[in-house]
Image (cartoon, helix red, strand yellow):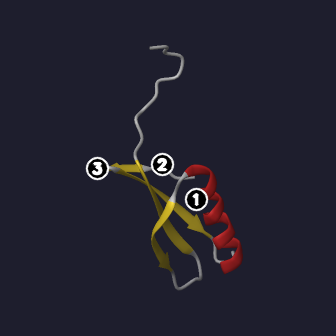
Amino acid sequence: MNEGVIDGDWEYRPLRLPAGVSRRTAATQLAIHAEFAGWELSRVLLYADGSRKVWLRRRRTAAVVPGVIT
């Protein structure tokens, strides 16, 4: 998966779906991202070849440094 981008209070992650992915499969994949990782749909581009570029977004959370006990 591509690297995410942080913009203000939001974190964005682009996702590329190939042309052979059905709408139902794409919706299922996006629902999994929403349910288990807190992402929501921000934008979708549909290309002439049938592929899609999807931007997911979620609110930024406080960064936690692993291994540090406070």
- How many other residues sit within 10 Å of disc 1, few (<14), some (14-19) or many (≥20)? some
User: Three-letter amino acid code at disc 2?
Assistant: Glu
Q: Is mark 2 on a helix, strand or loop?
A: loop
Look at the image and tell me whether residue 20 can be seen: no
Earlier in the chain: of badge 3 and badge 2, it is: 2
In this rendering, is residue 7 above or below 55?
above
The image shows residue 20 at horizontal and vertical percentages of 70, 77
Q: Do the residues labelled 2 and 1 touch (CB within 8 Å)?
A: no
Residue in the picture at 62% in, 56% down: 35
- Residue 53 marker: none
The amino acid on which the numbered mark 1 sits, given as a three-letter code, is Ala
Q: Can residue 13 be seen in this view?
A: yes
Query: Compared with residue 15, is residue 5 higher up or lower down, i.e. above or below?
Result: above
Residue furthest to the bottom: 48
Query: Which residue lies under the disc numbered 3?
Result: 8
Which residue is labeled 2 in the image?
3
Write down the residue under mark 1.
34
